[in-house]
Image (cartoon, helix red, strand yellow):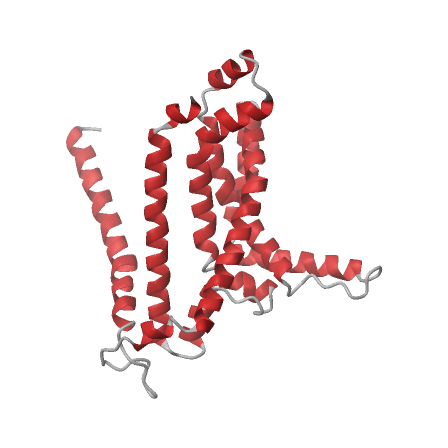
Amino acid sequence: MTPSKANWLKKASITTISLWLAIFVFIPTLLVIATSFLRVGENNFVIFSFTLDNYQKILDPVFFHVFFASCYLALITTFVCLLIGYPFAYLLTQFSPNIRRILLLLVIIPFWTSSLIRIYAIKILLLQIERSLRFFYPDVSILYTEMAVLIGLIYTMLPFMILPLFSTMEKLDRRLIEAAQDLGATPRQTFMRIILPLTIPGIIAGSMLVFLPVLGLFYVTDLLGGAKNIVIGNLIKNQFLVARNWPFASAASVFVIILMAMLIFVYIKSINRFGGSRHEKVQ
């Protein structure tokens, strides 16, 4: 390929991506922000009258209850995914490249199916387990509980934790681990002073990829929790589709956008800090 053709393809790709982001991300976000400053009408979705009342409603205790409930579910999901994903990703790196590819394929395969379909499958599975257990425990209840919601969230988000952890662990310098073992370090000391500090960027990346999407996975709580466990995504969805209060739904969406932007900023700063001082951490 000649340099001129390569340069043309580069410009075409950048232009296409920029147009896609502008049409489907930037412009809709601006519309949401603009709507958050309007009033709701009786016969119309919005009235073109400037107001800050929608942001004042965010200070309502009901909204904060939903927000903290969402963060609670997201934190538990992130913690459990980390507990499962960290040793799983480390074990992946111990296999030969051929077996590693097969195991990675098994991790990625769920992405080939709609997450909504997979949640329906989890719902059916939990229903069958509940029916089987009722032969021994008549009062047992699994479906439409917080436990069912957590199972669905963990199942859905676990690959997002495993993949960045595996990517980080795969790049570990094994000579550092071997040197620590030669110097008499115990497995615990090797993990705490070598492996863990070097994998912190993967932990942060995986945690962000799990925590942020959980805040908006309203269909998981609807299908597995029976709408009893409301996350902030449920609130926004209900305000748009049921209450038809688009201005308040937009204000809540802007609140989530700002929250995510702040967390992403913290993520970038953390990556720069831990990534830039790996050698010092190891020492």
- Inspect this view and state whether residue 94 appears: no
* Relative to 118, residue 240 above or below: below
* Relative to 54, residue 204 above or below: above
Left or right, 279 with reference to 125: left
- Inspect this view and state whether residue 249 appears: yes
Query: Between residues 206 and 45, which one lies in front from this camera angle?
Result: 206
> Residue 106 location, x and y as percent?
57, 39
Q: Residue furthest left?
A: 4
> Residue 152 location, x and y as percent?
59, 55
Which residue is located at x 54 percent, y 27 percent?
191
Give residue 247's quadrant in the image.
Answer: bottom left
Give residue 119's quadrant in the image.
Answer: bottom right
Count of numbered labels shown in the rendering: 0
* Relative to 54, residue 25 above or below: above
Left or right, 250 with reference to 19: right
Which residue is located at x 59 percent, y 59 percent?
149
Query: Between residues 162 and 1, which one lies in front from this camera angle?
Result: 162
Query: Between residues 49 and 152, which one lies in front from this camera angle?
Result: 49
Name the quarter where the N terminus is drawn: top left
> Residue 208 location, x and y as percent?
43, 47
Which residue is located at x 76 percent, y 63 percent?
140
Name the quarter where the C terminus is drawn: top left
> Residue 155 location, x and y as percent?
58, 50
